[in-house]
Amino acid sequence: MHEAYQVHSLLKLTFQIEAITAYDDNLLVGTRQGHLFMYSLVKNDDKCEVQLMRYNKSFSKKAVQQLEVIPDYHLLVSLTDNLIQLHDINAINFTTVHQIQKSKGATIFAINIQKKTSLTGDTSILVRLAVAVKRKLQLYYLKNNEFFQLMEDINLAEIPKSMVWCEETICVGYRGEYALIELNGQQTDLFPTSSSRSSEPCIVKASDKTFALCRESQTVLVNVLGQTEKTKALRWSDVPLTLAWDEPYALGVLPECIEVQTLEPPGVVQTLPDLSKVRFIITCQQGLLYTASVSQVWCICAVDVARQRKVLLDSKQFQLALKLTEISNENEEDKKEKIHQIQTLLAYDLFANKQFHESMKEFLKLETDPYDVIRLFPDLLPQQTAATDYPEPPKDLTEKELETGLLALIDYLTEMRHRLQSETQANVNARGNLNEKTNFSKSTQQLLQIIDTTLLKCYLQTNDALVAPLLRLNHCHLGETEKILKKMGKHNELIILYQTKGQHRRALELLQEEAGTERTIAYLQHLGADNMGLIIEFSDWVLTASPEEGLKIFTEDLAEVEALPRPRVLDFLLRSHASVVIPYLEHVVHVWEDSNPLFHNALVHQYREKAVSEGPAAAEHTRKKLLEFLKKSPHYTADTVLGHFPTDSLLEERAIILGRLGKHEQSLAIYVRALGDVQKAVEYAQKVYESNTPGCQSVYASLIKLVLNPDSCPLALPGLTLSPKTAQPDLELALELLKEHAFKMDPLEVLAVLPDNVPVTRIHKFLLVALQKAVKERRRVQLLKGLLYAEHLQCQEMRLHLQSQHVLVTEMNVCQVCKKRFGNQR
C-alpha cells in the first residue's frame, strides 16, 4: 500500500447537501432547501481551499435532486421538483434557459457527450440526455441550448435507481438488478445486485465502452455489448455505497471509510479514514475528486505522480507505476523514457520471479536486445556476463522451471527473428526491385546468428524435433553449432547444417561414415552442376557399392540432376563404371530426349561392343535394341559409327547405316549377297521408296539389277565369306519382283538392266503398268494446268471489277469519324 490521494476538508454547510457536481476548478453544491452554491477551488502548496463565487438561494422551491455540467456549452442540467431544466452556468443566478416539460415526474437522468474530429480538424460535439420518468426512458439531444426529442420513449421493466450512458448503450440499475438498453429498444438483463436482490444498484463509467457494476462487495466490468470481464474484478472489504473511477484507481465509498483499489494489479492501494457518512463521490478531472456527506464537502487530490512512482518502484510495483506514468501530464519525451525504464524493470522483475512468459512479452514490447535477454539463461552464451543494472536472474532453477523459461525464450526469439527478417524485406520492397535478393546487414546477420544458435540450444533441451527445420533455414554460427551437435550425437542434423552452410565435403564425408548410400545419393542429387567435382568424387564409392541405385545420382527426375554436364558424366562412367554406361545413355537419349550426336554415337558404340563381346548366341537382345535404335534415331553420325563396325559380323546393322548414308546399292548387296535374305532387301527397298528421299525412285531398279547381276555391286568386306548360291543370277526372281512392284520403278531404268533375250510377253504387264502410270501423270499435269488457268482468269476478273469502282470526295464532304469537312483539314 502507498499514499495515492490526500484528503482536504473544504467546507461545512448548515444546509443538507443533496447533489454535487464539478468541472475544471469549480464545484457546485445543491441542497435540500433548493439553494445552489458555486465555489472555486484554490490550491496552495499542499492545501486546498474554496471560495464562494455565486449563491442562488431561490434556485429551486424544492430539493435539488441531481446536477450535471456541460462545460463546452457552459450549461448546467438540473433535476429539481422532478423536472429537467437547463441553466446558463455563467449567469449570476444560473438563469434557466430551457425546461423539458415532458420530463415532469423524472427521477434520474444521464448525459452522454461525444466529441468527434473530422479530417479537416474541425471538432463536433454531440450532447444526448436520457431521462427516467417512471417506467419510461426519454431520449433527447441538445441543439441551440435546447433539448429536442431524439426518438420514441423506451418502456422499462421498473423505475431506475441508477443510470450511466456509454456510446449507444445505457446501463440501468433497478432495485435488485442490472440491465443494458440499446437505443434501438433492445434490452438485455445482466445479473442481480446481490443474492437477495435487496441491495441498491451502483454503476459508474469506467471507460468510454465499459461500465463498473457493484454486486455486493464485488465490482465487475461489463462492456457495451454486455460481455463481462471475467478475469478483472474489484473485491471490497464491505459493500460499497457508491463508486468513483479515477484511472488507474477505483474509489469505493464504504460505511466506515473510502477504499482505493486498482484493477491491474488487483488489490487495495490506500484507505482514506475519517470520512464518515459520505453520500456522494464524483470525479472532476484526472486526479481530482470531490466527496460529500449531508453537510460537509472534501476534496480528494492525487499525490504527485513522481512521488507515487518512486514509492512504487522502490516496492517493485512496476505495473502500477507504468499505468500512472502513461496517464501523467509529464513531457512526452521524458514520459517515453520513464515508461521504457519501468517496462525494463518490470520485465526483469517478472523474470526474477520466474514469470517467464510474461517477462518475454515485456521484452518484446521493449524490443530489448536479444543478447541481453539470452544471457539471463545459464550456458546459452559463451563467456556470458550478467547485467549489473537490473535484478539478478533466478539461480538453481528446477528442471521444470528451466523448461518453462526456455519455451518462453523460444517464443521471444522466434518473434524477434520474424521482425528482423520482415524489416529487411520491407526495406527491399521499398526500393521497388521485386527481384532483388534479401541481403542482411552485417549487424543484422550477427544478431540473427545469435538468435538461431540460441534457438538451436533451446530446441535441443525442449523439443529436438524442431532442430532440423531450424537448420534448413538458419543463420546459426557454424563452429558453435557444429560443436553442440557433435556433442549431442546429432549426425543427421549435423549433415543439414553442413548442407545449408555450403560445407558439402564435410557433409558427404559424414554421410559416407554414418548414413550409407541412400542418403548420400539424395544429397548428391541436389548439389547441382557447380559442385560437379564433389559429385564425381563421392559417387564413385556409391556406384561401386550399388551400381543400379548409384546411377540415380545422374538420372533422377530432378532439375539439378538434369542440368549436370552430361559429357563429363559420360566420361566419368566410361573410365570408372562401364557397367552403367548403357543405362545412362539410354536415359539421356530416350527419357531426356537429348539430340546431341555424342550420346547417340556413344550408345551405338556401346551396343556394338556389347554385341560383339557377348557372341552371336547371347547377343540377340542387344542386337535387337541396336537395330531398333539405328532405324529410329536421326541423330547419330552414320559415317562416324560405320568405321567402327566389324566387316564379318553385324551385317544387317551395317546395311542400315549404309542406307542412312544413301548407299542403297551397298545395303541391298549386303541383304542379297551377304545375308541371302531377299525378303529383307524388298522390305528395305519399300522403306526407302516411301521415304521420298533422293534416289528413292531407283531403289527397286537397283534391286532388280543386283538380282540379275550379283557382281554389279562388289562387297569390299574383308573376312566375309559369301555363299556361291547368292552369286548366281536369278531371272525368275527378277521378273516376279518386276511383276509385284511395277508401278514403283522407272521403266527406262528397268529396261536398261533386263537381258535382251527376255520375251515381251513376260514383261507385258510391267509395260502396261508403266504406260498407265505415264498417262495418269500426264492427265494430272493437264488438270493442274487447267485449274491454274481458271484461277488466273478469276483474279483478272476481280481486278477489273475493283478498278471500275471509284469514290468522289469534295471539300464539302464530312468525315464520318471526326465530323469535319475534308476541305478544312491541313
Image (cartoon, helix red, strand yellow):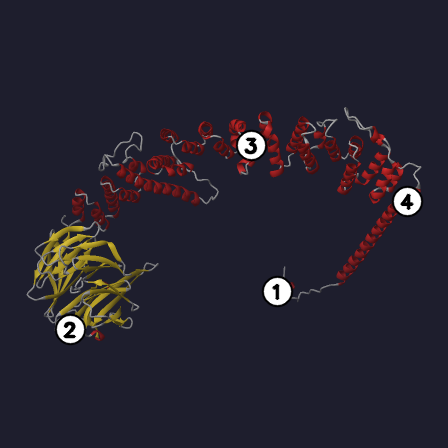
- The alpha-carbon separation of the residues under discs 2 and 1 comes to 85 Å
Check residue 103 in the rendering and tell me which mark sits there, or answer none.
none
Residue drawn at the location 36% of the way across and 43% of the way down: 419
Q: How packed is label 2: few (under 14 Cα within 10 Å), some, or many (20 or more)?
A: some
- Marks 1 and 4: CB-CB under 8 Å? no
Q: Splitting the image into 4 quarters, where does residue 167 fall? A: bottom left
Label 2 with label 1: CB-CB less than 8 Å: no
Left or right side of 325 for 422: right
Q: At label 1, which amino acid type do we have? A: Lys
**Which residue is tagged 1?**
820
State the mark number for residue 81: 2
* Residue 474 image offset from top left, x and y in percent: 40, 36
Mark 2 → mark 4, Cα distance in angstroms: 143 Å
Mark 4 is on which residue type? His
Nearest to the eye among marks 3 and 2: give it.
3
The type of residue carrying mark 2 is Asp
- Position of 24 compared to 793: left or right? left
Q: Is 485 positioned to the left or the right of 221 in the image?
A: right
Q: Along the polypeptide, which appears first: circle 3 or circle 2?
A: 2
